[in-house]
Image (cartoon, helix red, strand yellow):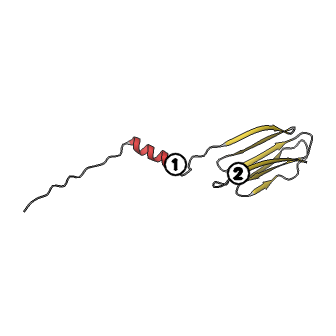
Amino acid sequence: MKRYRLNIKRCFLNEEKIFGAILYLSLALGLSTAAYASTEYAEGGTWSHGVGSKYVWSYYYHGHKGHGATAIGKYRSFSGYTRAGVKAKASATKNNWWVNRAYYNIY
């Protein structure tokens, strides 16, 4: 009777390969989030808007005119008419799969 010897190669994963795989998967699946925020001086007022890890927001302040702010994520949020000298604030839950938007309005 003839005996056969099996050659089994063993594969070992080193720590660098494991870390690289976890990093790649977290980026590919969107587990890392980048925040975007901006402040602009627009039409005599100050407009702050951005997208964070959970929310999209729009804040607008004007000292002499009525104004409003709108944020659109999973739903639309509107501050309503805000009188001069008061900051208009709107925020909505961020939409992960579509574009998030922020606006301001002057009356």
Q: Which residue is outermost to the left? A: 1
Residue at screen point 73% across, 39% down: 38
In the rendered image, which residue does mark 2 sit on? 100
Whether 85 is drawn above or below 94: the answer is above
82 sits to left or right of 95: right
Report the residue at 63% width, 55% height from top: 97
The crowd level at tag 2 (other Cα within 10 Å; few <14, some 14-19, many 20+) is many
Measured as percent of width and height from the top left, residue 35 is found at 65, 43
**Amino acid type, mark 2:** Asn
Q: Residue at x 75, y 44 (%)?
A: 49
Residue type at mark 1?
Ser
Residue at mark 2 to residue at mark 1: CA–CA distance: 22 Å
Image point 79% across, 45% down: which residue? 59
Tell me which corner region of the image, top left, top right, bottom left or bottom right, holds residue 1. bottom left
Element type where label 1 sits in the image: helix
Q: Which numbered tag is attached to residue 47?
A: none
Residue 33 lies left or right of residue 85; in this view the side is: left
Q: Nearer the viewer, mark 2 or mark 1?
A: 2
Query: Where's residue 93, x and y in %?
Result: 70, 54
Pointers 2 and 1 in contact (CB under 8 A)? no
Q: Quadrant of residue 96?
A: bottom right
Give how far across and how far down residue 99 sits, in percent.
Answer: 68, 52
Q: Secondary structure at mark 2?
A: loop
Q: Please, which residue is most extreme toward the bottom here?
A: 1
Callout 1 crowding tier (Cα within 10 Å): few <14, some 14–19, many ≥20: few
In-image side of 94 versus 2 (left or right): right
Vertical comparison of 54 with 2: above or below: above
4 up-or-down from 102: above or below: below
Label 2 or label 1, whichever comes before in sequence order: 1
What is the number of the mark on residue 26? 1
